Image (cartoon, rainbow, N blue to C red):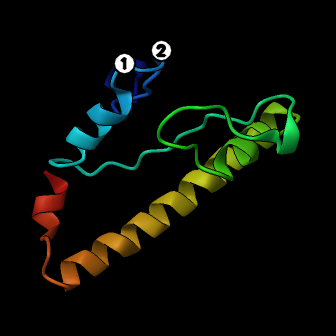
Amino acid sequence: MGQANRYARYLAIVQSSGTGKSRMIEELSKKHLVIPVNLRGPRESGPGLKYLSGYPPPDKKAPTYLSGTVSQKEARVHAVAFLRVVFQVASKRIAHLCEEGKYSYDQIAD
């Protein structure tokens, strides 16, 4: 498969504070399957390494797990493992929602 044929339905959202990123994701999630990940990390210093201000609060373990690697190979392994677990959990949750009759697989696929 050539470079021109690659396609993925994902989006990295990077913008200044207060510009409506979280609201945009909230609205998008009303019509599409969304798996948000907030990678804002902790402050470099301060009592208890509190997380930087902002809404929503960051995911607690993802930033450390994904950025705490030393080598490029280790970073790749962490990224693949992280995404594998995210998609396994999402798959189970989707199956559960479909079994409950809340959604059909076709509705989720749209």
Q: Is residue 26 above or below residue 5?
A: below
Q: Position of residue 100 (x, y in %)?
A: 19, 85
Position of residue 30 in the picture relative to residue 87 (left or right): left
Report the residue that reaches farthest toward the front: 47
Q: Amino acid at mark 1?
A: Thr
Q: Of the numbered discs in the image, which one, if any, rests on residue 16? A: 2
Q: Position of residue 24 (x, y in %)?
A: 27, 32
Q: Position of residue 17 (x, y in %)?
A: 48, 19
Residue that badge 1 annotates: 19
Q: In the rendered image, which quarter is residue 91 located in?
A: bottom left
Q: Is residue 9 visible?
A: no
Q: In the rendered image, which quarter is residue 42 located in?
A: top right
Q: Is residue 12 above or below residue 57?
A: above
Query: Cα distance, mark 1 to mark 2?
Result: 6 Å
Position of residue 100 in the picture relative to residue 73 (left or right): left
Position of residue 67 in the picture relative to residue 82 (left or right): right
Q: Tell whether label 2 touches label 1 (CB within 8 Å).
A: yes
Q: Amino acid at mark 2?
A: Ser
Which residue is painted at 39% across and 50% down in the image?
Answer: 35
As rendered, which of 50 and 39 lies closer to the eye?
A: 50
As rendered, which of 60 and 110 lies closer to the eye?
A: 60
Binning the other alpha carbons within 10 Å of mark 2 as few (below 14), some (14 to 19) or many (20 upward) gives few
Binning the other alpha carbons within 10 Å of mark 1 as few (below 14), some (14 to 19) or many (20 upward) gives few
Q: Dot 2: what SS?
A: loop
Q: Position of residue 49 (x, y in %)?
A: 82, 40
As rendered, which of 109 and 22 lies closer to the eye?
A: 22
Q: Is residue 55 above or below residue 86?
A: above
